[in-house]
Image (tube, helix red, strand yellow):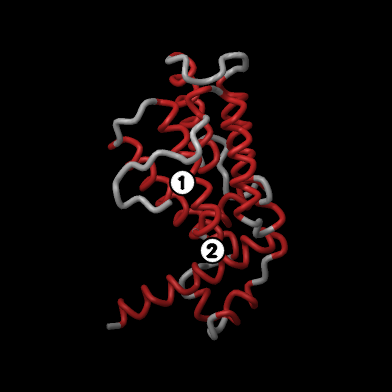
Amino acid sequence: MSQERSARTRRLLLGAAAREFAAHGYSGARLQTVVDRIGMTKGALYGHFASKDALAAGVAAEAALAWEALRGELAASSLDADKELRFLAERLARLMDDDTAFRAAVRLAVEGLREPAEGGLLTAISAHTTTLVRRAQAEQALAVGFPPAALADLLTAAIFAGAQSGDEPRTDRRTRLTGLWELLGPACREDRPPSMSPTDPS
């Protein structure tokens, strides 16, 4: 029972910390606010995370799990590169809207924190997106007038814009993505992203 209670406390702390980091970034986040959110003490927090750095790293690790799950979906798909790219963009946008830990980790990374010099969440997403852009261009399904890395940066910027200012209305993110699909190529001009399964929500 104590292990279950410890695991539950850790989950609560990570959830509260994610909300605090997403809203205020690393420097603005307050550990007292984190514990106040869930009616705990700083002593309880330090029993699981030795420092603010460790707490932020824990939130980043939760986001990394979400990214790995998404990569698994992509690997299991049989979509053409342009459709896979669009599916990736849609799912990343959903994570930004619905997964507080992911949104917090993106903000921390954009601010230059919790993102190692090599590897890290944004680096991994950028590399994967660039690979998909390159493939889609080779298949002549995407505009070829720009370097793949530049188009990948443009796409991820549209998804992650607003991360440093806290929550952003999801309609703004969707509007930017819709505009990009109109510009990037004929295969990206459908009204909605492809579903990978019949149960995939719209």
| For discs 2 and 1, the disc positioned in front in the rendered view | 1
Q: In which quarter of the image is the N terminus?
A: bottom left
Q: Which mark is residue 91?
A: 1
Residue at the image position 54 percent from the left and 63 percent from the top: 55
**CA gap, disc 2 to disc 1?**
26 Å
Q: Which mark is residue 55?
A: 2
Q: What is the three-letter code of the residue carrying label 1?
A: Arg
Q: Is mark 1 on a helix, strand or loop?
A: helix
Q: What is the three-letter code of the residue carrying label 2?
A: Leu
Residue 7 falls in image quadrant: bottom left
Position of 90 relative to 6 (above/below): above
Residue at the image position 60 percent from the left and 17 percent from the top: 147
| Percent coordinates x, y for residue 15 in the rendering | 50, 69
Q: Crowding near pointer 2: few (<14 within 10 Å), some, many (20+)?
A: many
Position of 92 relative to 131 (above/below): below
Q: Crowding near pointer 1: few (<14 within 10 Å), some, many (20+)?
A: some
